[in-house]
Image (spheres, rainbow, N blue to C red):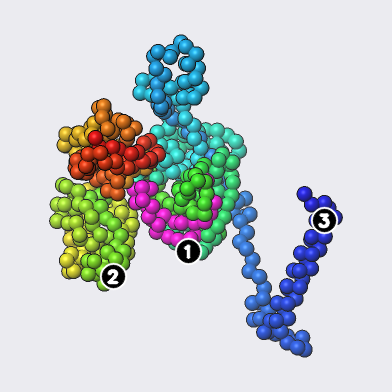
């Protein structure tokens, strides 16, 4: 710790060095004149430092329109049950302490789980915007206003495809915010407000780092996210992102992190997307999205060369779902989508927002590249919701090394951070190599060795090709975690 005298000495040294540095720069300036004459207004203006943006006015004007959201939901326990033979013995206390008393059927009794998020008021009579994942599965949603009033909210509607939700509280005369027109520029200053870790009305600032970002597994690819360097942390979800005019340019939704906290990248739902979705929810309580029924991927330079393409652009179709609108229109794997309704497609991530923004039943005009030739296809779009509600398989479960494998249900895929299409669910387990390796019912197989698992049939085929005595690393999704387990074929 520095003493007062030492600190003063250091300040003197720093100021002295700063003075020398400033003087040296001034002396070496090409515009300096020996006789001290006037260098002109242009040079003087160029030497003036540019002022940093002042956010105090925005905070003062809009902080009362930003709210804290707390939710309560019922969740089943997880983990091992207390064995019957240990109940009523000293070992029961051990299980209670280290496994939370999970002794109910299926791994434990239901318990209340509480979480926090943010939101902002868009109408004086109490309509509030937040993220769908903030209130998903909640049995109770409470909103705390700036004046510390706590009001129970009802969910008007939510759309998981865009991760947006609209709430309503019983109140009048509330302060509101305004949507921006949707136009932003990379590099412009923005301000986020919310409740990270429950610290309400926290304010952070930064710039727009990029536009049109597609994040795999987040909001289904239907949102062209704004990327920023604004510090966003758990609890900030659903809060507003303001421009310097005090208008909402985005809804803070995601962070990219390996630690669980902010690491320099955050993502917001653009205001033009959010405004349309919220308006549709307010008018009908529901949101519809067009559905094409294809899997697409980007085209890198190497892939373009292998396909004889001059330009590495567009979305390459790698799968057409059976009986989907794409299948009925004659689209095929290997086709490259170059444009949707005349709007050029630079990369695969451009396609979901364009298709999802259309109504089911409407016609999409696709410009395709097939075998080096351009062609036009008209597709009558289906409904995203209806496609997700349909069963993904009619096949019987597949047996492999003691595992009963089945396709991953869409509902489970939505609950976990799983790949869009791949994976095989372990529905049951018999005594055998898989059980010995530590695999469990409910695990989802993602990779066998270096090979992705597109479904239960392929998983069984890969395992059948293994030589007796060989060991293979298996990547599985267990809950929200992924882990490798070594599987030995006898």
Q: Which corner quadrant of the image does residue 53 belong to?
A: bottom right
Q: In the image, which residues are magenta?
A: 208-233
- Closer to the N terminus: mark 2 or mark 3? 3
Q: Is residue 209 above or below residue 220?
A: below
Lateral position of residue 305 relative to residue 119, left or right: left
Pinpoint residue 35: horizontal percent, then vertical percent. Answer: 77, 89
Q: Secondary structure at mark 2?
A: loop
Q: Badge 2: how crowded within 10 Å, few (<14), some, or many (20+)? A: few
Asked if disc 2 and disc 1 are in contact, CB closer than 8 Å, the reply is: no
Q: Is residue 370 above or below residue 171?
A: below
Query: Which mark lies nearer to you, 3 or 1?
Result: 3
State the CA–CA distance, disc 2 to disc 1: 25 Å
Nearer mark to the viewer, of 2 and 3: 3
Would you say residue 418 sits in the magenta stretch? no
Q: Quadrant of the C terminus?
A: top left
Q: In the rendered structure, does residue 212 fall within the stretch colored magenta?
A: yes
In the rendered structure, the answer to whether residue 214 lies left or right of residue 358 reads right
Q: State the mark number for residue 400.
A: none
Q: Pointers 3 and 1 in contact (CB under 8 A)? A: no
The residue wearing badge 1 is 186
Closer to the chain start, of discs 3 and 1, is 3
Residue at screen point 38% across, 48% down? 218
Query: Which of the two discs, 2 and 1, labels the residue nearer the N terminus?
Result: 1
Foreground label between 2 and 1: 2
Residue at screen point 18% across, 64% down: 370
The residue wearing badge 3 is 6
From the image, tell me which residue sits under label 2.
311
Look at 19% across and 40% down and name the residue there.
464
Tell me residue 290's x, y (percent). Answer: 26, 50
């Amino acid at each position: 710790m520095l003493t007062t005298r030492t600190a003063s000495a250091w300040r003197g040294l720093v100021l002295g060095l700063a003075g020398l540095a400033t003087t040296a720069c001034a002396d070496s300036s090409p515009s300096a004149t020996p006789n001290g004459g006037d260098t002109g207004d242009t040079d003087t203006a160029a030497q003036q430092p540019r002022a940093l943006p002042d956010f105090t006015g925005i905070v003062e004007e809009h902080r009362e329109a930003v709210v804290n959201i707390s939710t309560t939901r019922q969740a089943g326990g997880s983990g091992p049950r207390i064995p019957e033979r240990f109940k009523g013995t000293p070992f029961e206390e051990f299980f209670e302490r280290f496994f939370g008393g999970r002794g109910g059927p299926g791994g434990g009794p239901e318990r209340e789980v509480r979480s926090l998020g943010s939101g902002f008021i868009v109408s004086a009579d109490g309509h509030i915007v937040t993220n769908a994942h903030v209130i998903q599965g909640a049995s109770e949603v409470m909103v705390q206003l700036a004046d510390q009033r706590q009001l129970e909210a009802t969910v008007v509607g939510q759309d998981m495809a865009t991760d947006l939700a609209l709430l309503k509280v019983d109140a009048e005369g509330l302060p509101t915010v305004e949507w921006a027109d949707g136009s932003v520029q990379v590099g412009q200053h923005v301000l986020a407000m919310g409740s990270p870790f429950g610290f309400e009305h926290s304010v952070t600032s930064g710039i727009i780092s990029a536009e049109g970002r597609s994040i795999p597994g987040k909001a289904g690819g239907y949102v062209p996210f704004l990327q920023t360097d604004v510090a966003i942390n758990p609890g900030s979800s659903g809060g507003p992102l303001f421009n310097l005019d005090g208008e909402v340019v985005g809804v803070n939704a995601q962070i990219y992190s390996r630690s669980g906290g902010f690491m320099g990248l955050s993502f917001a739902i653009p205001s033009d997307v959010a405004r349309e979705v919220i308006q549709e929810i307010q008018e009908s309580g529901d949101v519809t999205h067009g559905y094409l029924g294809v899997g697409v991927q980007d085209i890198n330079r190497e892939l373009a060369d292998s396909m004889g393409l001059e330009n590495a652009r567009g979305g390459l179709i790698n799968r057409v779902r059976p009986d989907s609108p794409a299948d009925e229109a004659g689209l095929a794997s290997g086709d490259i989508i170059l444009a949707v309704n005349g709007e050029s497609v630079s990369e695969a991530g451009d396609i979901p927002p364009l298709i999802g923004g259309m109504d089911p039943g409407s016609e999409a005009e696709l410009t395709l590249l097939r075998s080096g030739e351009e062609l036009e296809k008209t597709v009558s779009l289906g409904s995203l919701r209806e496609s997700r509600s349909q069963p993904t398989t009619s096949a019987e479960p597949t047996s492999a090394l003691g595992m009963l494998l089945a396709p991953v249900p869409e509902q489970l895929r939505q609950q976990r951070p799983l790949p869009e299409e791949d994976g095989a669910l372990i529905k049951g387990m018999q005594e055998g190599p898989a059980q010995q390796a530590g695999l469990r019912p409910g695990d989802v197989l993602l990779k066998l060795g270096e090979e992705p698992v597109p479904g239960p049939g392929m998983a069984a085929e890969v395992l059948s090709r293994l030589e007796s005595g060989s060991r293979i690393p298996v990547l599985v999704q267990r809950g929200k975690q992924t882990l490798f387990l070594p599987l030995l074929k006898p």
